[in-house]
Image (spheres, helix red, strand yellow):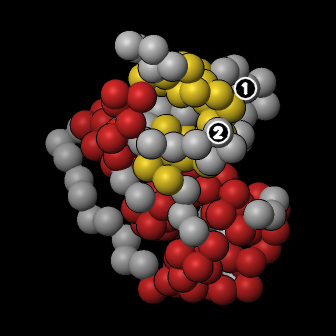
Amino acid sequence: MYEVGDYIVHPGQGVCRVEEITAGPAATYQLLPVAQRHAMRISFPVAGEDRLRPVLSRDEAVRAIDLYPSIEVDDFSAKSSSLEEEHFKAEIRRGSCIDTMRIVKTFRARIAEVRSRNKKPPVAYERILKQASERSLAELAVALDTTVEDVKALLATREGEDLEAN
């Protein structure tokens, strides 16, 4: 069971802070998303806590940043862009921080490849990149007890790029 003050990753909302735990037969966590501008408190049943996961530790975050240059892109493809988008959004919801970093790298490469042919990338690519980028940057920032901008700068020193879209 998580404690008040813990940071966790909610499948839909990303990194949240446990603000309160209500007791009773339907015990709930009161969660406050940290990466949203106008965050609203979310009630999440304690019984469903297996869908939550703790934020990376500081050591795990440092290791993830060190691994970023060597993360392979995901070669998943489907017959339609909507099926691809569904697949990657599900991966963002269920996956680890490394998984979201892989998705960021994948869609940065896909967008760059489309642009190299003087084409405009699909809106879905931009949307997936933005969601994965925000999720992974927020988790790394919380794990390292720093800001998203500092994490971007740290990643830029690793490979000459960051997790933000071009």
Left or right position of 93 against 117: left
Q: Amino acid at mark 2?
A: Val
x then y, percent, for residue 63: 54, 82
Q: CA distance from mark 2 to mark 1?
A: 18 Å
Residue neighbourhood size for the residue with mark 2, other residues' Cα within 10 Å, grouped as few (<14), some (14–19), many (≥20): few
- On residue 39, the disc is 1
* Mark 2 or mark 1: whose residue is earlier in sequence: 2
The answer to whether residue 152 of the structure is visible from this angle is: no
Q: Is residue 21 above or below residue 75?
A: above
Q: What SS does tag 1 mark?
A: loop
Nearer to the camera, 101 or 122 = 101
- On residue 9, the disc is none
Point out the image quarter for the C terminus. bottom right
x then y, percent, for residue 81: 31, 39
Residue neighbourhood size for the residue with mark 1, other residues' Cα within 10 Å, grouped as few (<14), some (14–19), many (≥20): few
Left or right position of 95 against 114: left
User: What residue is pinned by disc 2?
Assistant: 4
Nearer to the camera, 114 or 29 = 29
Q: Residue at x 45, y 42 (%)?
A: 1
Depth check, mark 2 against mark 1: the one in front is: 2
x then y, percent, for residue 115: 54, 59
